[in-house]
């Protein structure tokens, strides 16, 4: 199978690297040329956070969009802020049988893909894998957990070969019909963790050391739960807040994706995470003041970071 990763940051490189190691033909597409060149020159180095072991794998990397032509699968791992642009750009390279899978954080990416590729080619998934970008050609595999994927048109058989390839690459993968539940269940975890780690400049585990922070996590999660419940969305876990605390503990040494964005002066996915709850709540006439305040703070810092980026 030819599998192209669109957006080969930490998570994209992790999936692409492991799939290449398992024998798939992989293209890691990214606009970040230093990373692309480093991978092609020296391979992709994957450090296992648990054991400290380093494995070097050799997927092909490219900054040329044409390199993904003739792919059987496109896995979208760009920041949610650029999904729209990327979907429009890569539409020309998707064949009638190409599966376009989003494994991004946040709410709304599958809707964008469906609009561009149709439900018959769109798949959506959530993953509990975690990765940190260490520098060009280097990532850390920071957390392991299941990956669930679902076909937007419900035709699960189309995902069989991909699920098998992912499993062979070491990712525990399940094909599921419960996509809304899965996306919201992951969303609520990101709502409780990501913005606070970014605002406080701490790794995930440190959030749990402060009662005040745990109380804000509870407010963020409870507001989101109220919205989910009004929309009749069932979550995949029984105790959402306990699950959020548990994920923060299990990924204690992770630098969350939002904090990684802050550190690299990149725009965050706040509008697809806490901001998405604010948007959904507005439609329902529900107040979500804590999510609204946190969204405003992160958005302001995004602007300040981009101004700093422009000056550099
Ligand atoms: O976005 C992230 O960083 C991850 O989804 C999570 C679960 C918060 C772990 O770092």
Image (tube, helix red, strand yellow):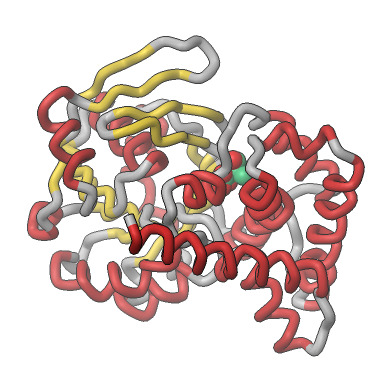
Residue 192 shown left or right of residue 306 in the figure: right
Q: Residue at x 32, y 67 (%)?
A: 121
Residue 309: % across, % down? 37, 58
Residue 203 shown left or right of residue 258 in the figure: right
Q: Residue at x 35, y 74 (%)?
A: 84
Compare residues 57 and 45 and report the one nearer the observer. Answer: 45
Compare residues 129 and 172 and report the one nearer the observer. Answer: 129
Residue 223: % across, % down? 83, 67
Quadrant assignment for ligand 1: top right
Q: Residue at x 54, y 15 (%)?
A: 50
Image position of 118 with respect to 259: above or below: below
Location of residue 247 (image quadrant):
top right
How many marks are shown on the rendered structure?
A: 0
Residue 148 shows in this picture? no
Quadrant where the C terminus sits is bottom left
Residue 15 shows in this picture? yes
Location of residue 23 (image quadrant):
top left
Image position of 228 with respect to 48: above or below: below
């Amino acid at each position: 199978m030819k599998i192209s990763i669109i957006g080969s940051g930490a998570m994209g490189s992790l999936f692409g690297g492991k799939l290449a190691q398992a024998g798939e033909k992989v293209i890691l597409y990214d606009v970040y040329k230093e990373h692309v060149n480093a991978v092609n020159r020296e391979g992709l180095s994957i450090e296992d956070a648990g054991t400290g072991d380093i494995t070097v794998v050799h997927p092909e990397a490219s900054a040329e969009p044409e390199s993904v032509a003739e792919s059987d699968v496109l896995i979208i791992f760009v920041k949610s802020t650029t999904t729209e642009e990327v979907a429009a750009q890569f539409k020309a390279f998707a064949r009638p049988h190409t599966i376009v899978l989003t494994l991004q954080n946040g709410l709304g990416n599958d809707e964008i893909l469906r609009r561009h590729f149709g439900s018959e080619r769109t798949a959506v998934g959530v993953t509990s894998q975690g990765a940190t970008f260490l520098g060009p050609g280097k990532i850390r595999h920071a957390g392991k957990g299941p990956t669930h994927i679902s076909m937007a048109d419900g035709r699960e058989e189309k995902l069989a070969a991909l699920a098998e390839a992912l499993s062979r690459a070491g990712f525990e993968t399940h094909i599921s019909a419960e996509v809304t539940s899965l996306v919201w269940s992951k969303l609520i975890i990101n709502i409780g963790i990501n913005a606070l780690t970014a605002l406080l400049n701490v790794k995930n585990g440190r959030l749990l050391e402060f009662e005040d922070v745990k109380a804000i996590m509870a407010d963020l999660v409870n507001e989101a739960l109220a919205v989910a419940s009004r929309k009749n969305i069932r979550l995949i876990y029984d105790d959402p807040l306990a699950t959020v605390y548990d994920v923060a503990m299990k990924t204690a040494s992770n630098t969350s994706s939002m904090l990684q964005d802050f550190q690299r002066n990149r725009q965050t996915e706040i509008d697809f995470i806490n901001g998405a709850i604010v948007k959904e709540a507005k439609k329902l006439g529900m107040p979500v003041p804590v999510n609204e305040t946190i969204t405003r703070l992160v958005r302001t810092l995004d602007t300040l970071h981009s101004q700093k980026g422009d000056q550099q």
